[in-house]
Image (tube, helix red, strand yellow):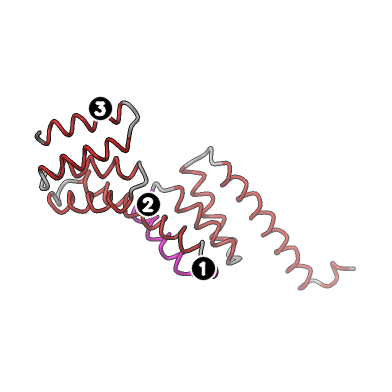
Amino acid sequence: MDGETCLRQAYDAIFQGDFELAVHWFGQAIALEPDNAAYLYSGSITCARSGKLALALAYARKAAQLQPDNQAYSLNLRMIESRQRISDVRQLLAAPVPDIEACVEMLKEAAQLDPLSADARLILGILYRMQRNYKQSLESLRDALQLEPQNEEAKRLLHEVRAERRRLLKHQYSQYNPQRNR
């Protein structure tokens, strides 16, 4: 069997909705032709869609390394690196005492790698809210909504953060203006 036959099998599997089988066939094609950047690129996309980010990243890196001037391969690599950082942040946030600052920095990198990542901005908005940095939280949540206007979680969080910020400002104003309290 040659790489092209394996590639056809992979695409047939995708059309049938069997992404695990597609990942297998891309792996077979890549094993037969490990320096075929097109196979690596296609395999990385399917692996990323299947949640196999480590394998997707390995394939994408090699494709970009083999053809550094190919913008599609470079863009794909950046998007997968972004998704990997978001995945890493989610794992860090599950820790008993998460390092919020490290997570914020990783999400900033993710957003820079993939400017169209609504997830990076949504999670950034949540983390900024946890830090009581309402201005940055609102900005990140607005960005997430601009990228994904139907994102109900971003809409809800934006409303909540606006309300929290108003309460805080009202409280601060009442502290500095004692006459208003009478």
Check disc 1 and report the residue beneath it.
Answer: 98
Tag 3: amino acid: Asp
From the top left corner, tell me how far across and down residue 173 is, in percent: 75, 67
Labelled pair 2, 3 in contact (Cβ < 8 Å): no
Q: Secondary structure at mark 3?
A: helix
- Which residue is painted at 73% across and 60% down in the image? 167
Crowd class of label 3 (few under 14; some 14 to 19; many from 20; radius 10 Å): some
* Spatial separation of the CA atoms under disc 1 and disc 3: 43 Å
Numbered tag placed on residue 12 in the rendering: 3
Check disc 2 and report the residue beneath it.
Answer: 83
Dominant SS in magenta: helix
Q: Nearer the viewer, residue 155 or 60?
A: 60
From the top left corner, tell me how far across and down residue 91 is, in percent: 45, 60
Crowd class of label 1 (few under 14; some 14 to 19; many from 20; radius 10 Å): some
- Which quadrant is the N terminus positioned in? top left
From the top left corner, tell me how far across and down residue 92 is, in percent: 46, 64
* Spatial separation of the CA atoms under disc 2 and disc 3: 26 Å
In the image: residue 24, left or right of residue 95: left
Crowd class of label 2 (few under 14; some 14 to 19; many from 20; radius 10 Å): many
Q: Secondary structure at mark 2?
A: helix
Residue 2 falls within the magenta-colored stretch: no
Tag 1: amino acid: Pro
Tag 2: amino acid: Arg
Q: Secondary structure at mark 1?
A: loop
N-terminal-most mark, 2 or 1: 2
Which stretch did the figure color magenta? Answer: 96-115
- Which residue is painted at 18% across and 33% down in the image? 7
Q: Is residue 90 above or below residue 51?
A: below
